[in-house]
Image: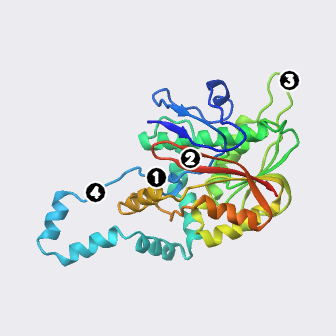
Amino acid sequence: MSYSVSLSSPIHFHTNSRFFSTFPPKLPNKLKTTVTTTTVAAIPPLSTATSVTDVSVLDSTTVALIGGGSVAALAAVLSFTDPERRRRLQAEEVGGGDKEVVRNYFNNSGFQRWKKIYGETDDVNKVQLDIRLGHSKTVENVMKMLTDDGSLNGVTVCDAGCGTGCLSIPLAKEGAVVSASDISAAMVAEAEKQAKEQLIAGNGDIAPVMPKFEVKDLESLDGKYDTVVCLDVLIHYPQNKADGMIAHLASLAESRLILSFAPKTFYYDLLKRIGELFPGPSKATRAYLHAEADVERALNKVGWKIRKRGLITTQFYFARLVEAVPA
């Protein structure tokens, strides 16, 4: 498998092993990557909600049953492979729309799955390991973008959608004052646990400031921060709602907003649609792709412009990363 970055901006993603080992989770030696780079920027994975962990197809027995004239069997298969119907049923079960489905998923089965992916356990399959690599490269590149502008000591950062703390903890280690939040109480609890284990003083050094973790959705965030970072979250918002969310996040940032999102291109959209036809237990939330032009338009509308941009891809991870500043 390969890792490729295709970028256009004034900075470069660095991929040397010394830097890589500083921030992201450790990766087993069995996963090797090839890296090509030009200029910088980054984004979140298509796999966040649609990763193909256990793709199953209709076998010959199923086809034979349908071929035998079973209308009921055909209806069952169509129902099983209808992503919209599946999403509606999920929403009804938890008594809400997309947000409640996401909250429920990441507090239950989704939490267990993504805790493994974001962690260091060897108990992951090939696809999950590949997603871990892609996500760790996103975190690495965000840290590179931030530290290239100088020390993070005392810089206030809002980590919106912090997950298990993959970004919040490295930020705190660099001296940033981090406010971290997630819609999932389970994710926040795990992030706090990881932070307490990792953010300890050693050899007489002063311990980093512990991030402030809260259970909040993006709409509930308030305050002002030097930098706001939102990784892998816009995949849960359709474009009309993403526009409003981008405006809200920009209103919280004083000098910089970093976003990652699943890019909407013909190729990635086709992959997503194919994946939705084969629902597995890991694919429990609706996934929305976003065209870079739409994200840029939303930023421009509220007086922000993109300064750096880039693409991170592995076999099963596709993420566009943009850094925006006031125009």
Relative to 266, is 17 above or below?
above
> Label 4, on which residue?
57
- Residue at image position (58%, 63%) is 236
Question: Position of 175 compared to 40: left or right?
Answer: right
| Pointer 4 local density, CA inside 10 Å: few below 14, some 14–19, many at least 20 | few
> Label 3, on which residue?
204
Q: Earlier in the sequence, mark 2 or mark 3?
A: 2
Q: How far separated are the C-alphas under marks 2 and 4?
A: 27 Å
Question: Position of 71 compared to 267: left or right?
Answer: left
Q: Earlier in the sequence, mark 4 or mark 3?
A: 4
- Foreground residue among 54 and 288: 288
- Foreground residue among 117 and 37: 37
Identify residue type, mark 4. Val
Q: Position of residue 323 (x, y in %)?
A: 72, 50
Q: Position of residue 163 (x, y in %)?
A: 64, 51
Instruction: Please state which of the two labelled residues, at mark 4 or mark 3, is closer to the viewer.
Output: 4
Question: Position of 35 compared to 168: left or right?
Answer: left
Whether residues under marks 1 and 2 lie with C-beta atoms below 8 angstroms apart, the answer is no
Q: Earlier in the sequence, mark 1 or mark 4?
A: 1
> Label 2, on which residue?
115
Instruction: Please state which of the two labelled residues, at mark 1 or mark 2, is closer to the viewer.
Output: 1
Q: Which mark is residue 51?
A: 1
